[in-house]
Image (tube, rainbow, N blue to C red):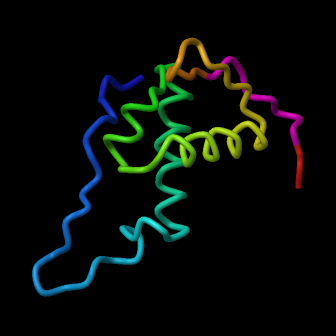
Amino acid sequence: MTTARFDAPASMSPARHHARPPYAQREGVAFRVIRLIWLTALLARRDPVRIADYQRRFGMSVRSFRRDIALLRKAGMYIESAAYGDYRMLCFLMDSDLA
């Protein structure tokens, strides 16, 4: 496994003389996908996921964090909250097909 950290804040500053690209829009679908990929990568590495890190990186609310965690749980990840603000994945349910 890599030792790279995924805690760098996402850039929210617009490029000079250009509009912000669609994936950087906070309300866009692509930005939610980026948040879910980030969460999945951390959870798959068995790293603890903290609400404070999520908020610092994406500038989103606790409510958005909980919605994203709920979506990953619905996808088959068994995620527990170890302490207030800390989440970790216990297992991934391969037979989960909620489509």
The quadrant of the rendering that contains the C terminus is: bottom right
Q: Position of residue 82 (x, y in %)?
A: 59, 12
Residue at image x 37%, y 33%? Answer: 53
Q: Position of residue 97 (x, y in %)?
A: 89, 45
On screen, 65 above or below 77? below
On screen, 17 above or below 10? below
Say whether residue 23 is left or right of residue 67.
left
Q: As rendered, which of 94 and 40 lies closer to the eye?
A: 40
Query: Looking at the rendering, which quadrant does residue 4 occupy?
Result: top left
Query: Looking at the rendering, which quadrant does residue 83 occupy?
Result: top right
Does the magenta run of residues contain 92?
yes
Q: Residue furthest left?
A: 16
Q: Position of residue 94 (x, y in %)?
A: 82, 33
On screen, 68 above or below 20? above
The span shown in magenta is 89-96
The quadrant of the rendering that contains the N terminus is: top left
Residue at image x 31%, y 40%? Answer: 56
Q: Residue furthest top?
A: 82
Q: As rendered, which of 77 and 95 lies closer to the eye?
A: 77
Give the tally of numbered discs.
0
Residue at image x 64%, y 46%? Answer: 67
Say whether residue 34 is left or right of residue 66.
left
Does the magenta run of residues contain 76?
no
Q: Position of residue 37 (x, y in %)?
A: 52, 47
